[in-house]
Image (cartoon, rainbow, N blue to C red):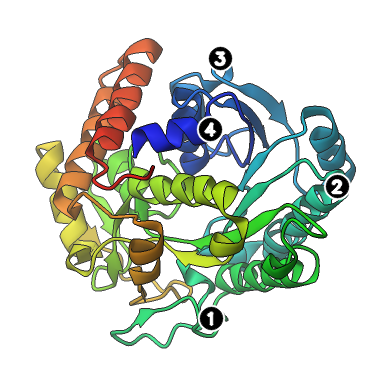
Amino acid sequence: MSSFLQNAYKDKTVLVTGHTGFKGSWLLLWLAELGAKVIGYSLEPHTEPSIFNAINLREKVTHIIGDVNDHGALCSLFKKYQPEFVFHLAAQSLVRRSYEEPMLTYQTNVMGTLNVLEAIRKIGSVKACVIVTSDKCYENREISYCYKETDPLGGYDLYSSSKGCAELLTSAYRRSFFNPEDYNKTHSLALSSARAGNIIGGGDWADNRIIPDCVRALSKGESIVVRNPEATRPWHYVLECLSGYLLLGALMRKDGVKYSDAWNFGPKEENEMSVEELVKLTIKYWGNGKYARDTAPHPHEAGLLKLDISKACGLLHWDPIYKVSEAMERTVKWYRLFYSNASVEDLRKFTINEIRGYQSSMKRGWN
C-alpha cells in the first residue's frame, strides 16, 4: 500500500484546502512524506495552540493564506500552480458554532465548496478531487443503523445540513460537468466526496470537541466537563480516515470512471463507545484526572450516528486497523509529548513516525 501511495503522489502537485486545521495538517505532512509538491490554502489556524504551528508545517509545503469564499483568489491559485490533485477540507467544522454563526457556516461549507468546484472547472488541470464533508450529512434517524452512501441526506442542525448541501452540490457537479460516462471524452476529472466524523488524534484543539476538552482540562489539573456522556460515537483515528482519502484519490487518478462517487470512511462497529467511556479511557492513558457531567442545557447534537463502510472496504480495499483503545493511547501520547514542552523538531519527528508506523501497518496493497 505504501508503495502504491508513493507512486501515485510523488512529484505530483497536490492542493489541500483547510491545510492549517487538524485533519488538514496531518494530511499535509503525510503528502509531504510521500514526496508530493503540496500547496496549502487556508485561513490561519483558528486555535492556539494548533498542530500546524506546533510542528511548523510552513517549512514542509507552499503555505498560502486565503479564504475559500474568495473565488478570484482561488482561480488565481489554480491557474498559477496547476494542481493535479485536490483535497478540499476547508470548512466551518463545528456543530455548536453553526448555531452561533449560521450564515458563515453555509457560506463556507456550501459556497466555499462551490468556489472550489468552479475553479477546478475553469482551470482544467485537476485530475482527481476529493470533497471532504461529514458523516453528519445524512438524515439521522437516531437508530442503531449504519448509513449507506445511498441513504437520504439531510441534517438536524445547521452544520449537518450545510454538509448535506455540499454533498448535493458535489453530486450535481459530477453529473452536470464531470459525469463518469463522459470521462476522457468531454473532461478528464474524477470527482468524489468523502464522509467521515468523530475523528480523534493528536493536535486537535477545537472548541467543544471531547478530546480537546479533555486534554485542556487534564493539562491544567482541572476536572473534565462532559456535556453528553451517553452519546455513542464510532471513534475514528485521524490516520485511518486520511488513509481512505489518499487511497481514494490515488485510485481515482488510476480509474476515474470506477471511483467517482460518494464514500463513507469510519471505524469497524466494535469501535463504538460512549462519550463517557472515551473520557475514562483518556484519563487512563493520561495517568490521572477526573470528570463531571455538565447539566446545563445545550443545543441539539446527534446521540447516535454510524456509517456503513462496506463499500470502501470492498471496492477500495481500504481497511481500518486500530481499535479505539490503541487510537486513544496514540492520541494521548501525542498530547503528553506536547505538554512536556517538547521541541518543534521532536514533536514533528514523533508525528512523522506515527504516519510511517501507520503506513507500514496498512494491510492491503495495489499493483
The residue under the point 59% across, 23% down is 11
Number of the label disc, if any, that sits on residue 294:
none
> Distance between the Cα atoms at labels 4 and 1?
38 Å
Q: Residues within 10 Å of mark 3 (few under 14, many from 20)?
A: few
* Residue denoted by label 3: 59
Q: Earlier in the sequence, mark 4 or mark 1?
A: 4
Q: Is residue 290 visible?
A: no
Say left or right for 247 vs 352: right
* Residue denoted by label 2: 71
Mark 2 falls on what kind of element? helix
The residue under the point 81% across, 41% down is 74
* Residue denoted by label 4: 9
Q: Is residue 241 visible?
A: yes
Q: Earlier in the sequence, mark 3 or mark 1?
A: 3
Q: Residues within 10 Å of mark 4 (few under 14, many from 20)?
A: many
Q: Where is 224 relative to 183, above or below?
A: above
The residue under the point 83% across, 54% down is 118
Mark 3 falls on what kind of element? helix
* Residue denoted by label 1: 156
> Distance between the Cα atoms at labels 2 and 4?
26 Å
Mark 1 falls on what kind of element? loop
Is the residue under label 4 in contact with that under label 2 (CB below 8 Å)?
no
Closer mark to the observer between disc 3 and disc 1: 3
